[in-house]
Image (cartoon, rainbow, N blue to C red):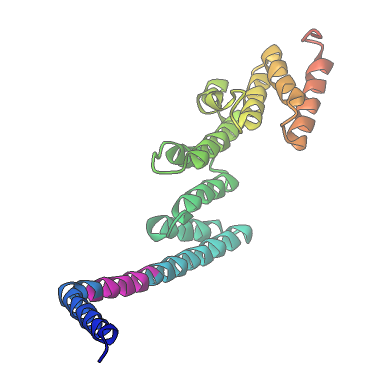
Amino acid sequence: MSDDSFIREVEEELRSDRLKGFWDRFGPILIGAAILVVVATAGWRGYEYYVDTQASASGDRFLAALNLANDGKSDEALAALEALEGDGFGAYPVLARMRAATVLQEKGDSAGAVAAFDAVAADSSAPVAVRDIANIRAAFILVDSGTASDVAQRAEALSSDDNPLRHAAREALGLAAWKEGRLADAKVLFQQIADDPAAPRNAQQRAAIMLDLITASGEVSEG
């Protein structure tokens, strides 16, 4: 046997001994880690399936409740929405609360609808955007059934220049002012909507109509 062959055999035995020692020391840890990866992956897949299943079931229930409301079955729709509020998944409970408030409004229960929207608006667990929309919805109901102060309590904070709901807030405030005969205040609010390039076209059109009505009344000077 040559020296080179002998040296190679020794090196191979050393590597084999080192590998065996490494495996004896760390093998169980590596196997445990591999098992954890498999279990974690399976658990995550199971959770994803659970989430998808629950969300799909809640979505189906929400759609069924909407269909009941659209068919004029208000009481049945409210019962279905109330159940979804209690055990729905994801965003569906708060959506159910919002839709239930709308059903109450459609039934003519303005006070109940305002109370329901106010409850969502006061719920710190609800998304801020949903809470703001609830305030706007309550404000528009109160244009007819409440006072300008009631409307302002819900819409004033949303009428700032940087708020995405400012157009709706200003419209509610403008209608409330117009209803109370404060035409100068109403004109300012509707003019803000009409002059805002970011305002939706239908909101600008309604603002223009209100400005024409205010001008036609002759009680507010131009400018």
Q: Answer with left or right where residue 53 lies relative to residue 67.
A: left
Residue at 32% of width from left, 71% of height from top?
A: 37
Residue 203 placement (x, y as % from top left): 73, 33
Please tell me whether residue 106 is drawn above or below residue 69 in the rendered image.
Answer: above
Closer-to-camera residue (98/217): 98
Closer-to-camera residue (125/206): 125
Look at the image and say whether residue 194 sits in the magenta stretch: no
Residue at 51% of width from left, 61% of height from top?
A: 76
Residue range (magenta): 31-44
Question: Which residue is situated farthest in the front direction here?
Answer: 2
- Number of numbered labels in the structure image: 0
Residue at 55% of width from left, 50% of height from top?
A: 103
Q: Quadrant of residue 64?
A: bottom right
Closer-to-camera residue (49/22): 22
Q: Answer with left or right where residue 124 lies relative to residue 106.
A: left
Q: Quadrant of the C terminus?
A: top right
Q: Quadrant of residue 42?
A: bottom left
Please tell me whether residue 99 is drawn above or below residue 24 in the rendered image.
Answer: above
Residue 169 placement (x, y as % from top left): 61, 29
Residue at 53% of width from left, 67% of height from top?
A: 60
Residue 45 placement (x, y as % from top left): 40, 71
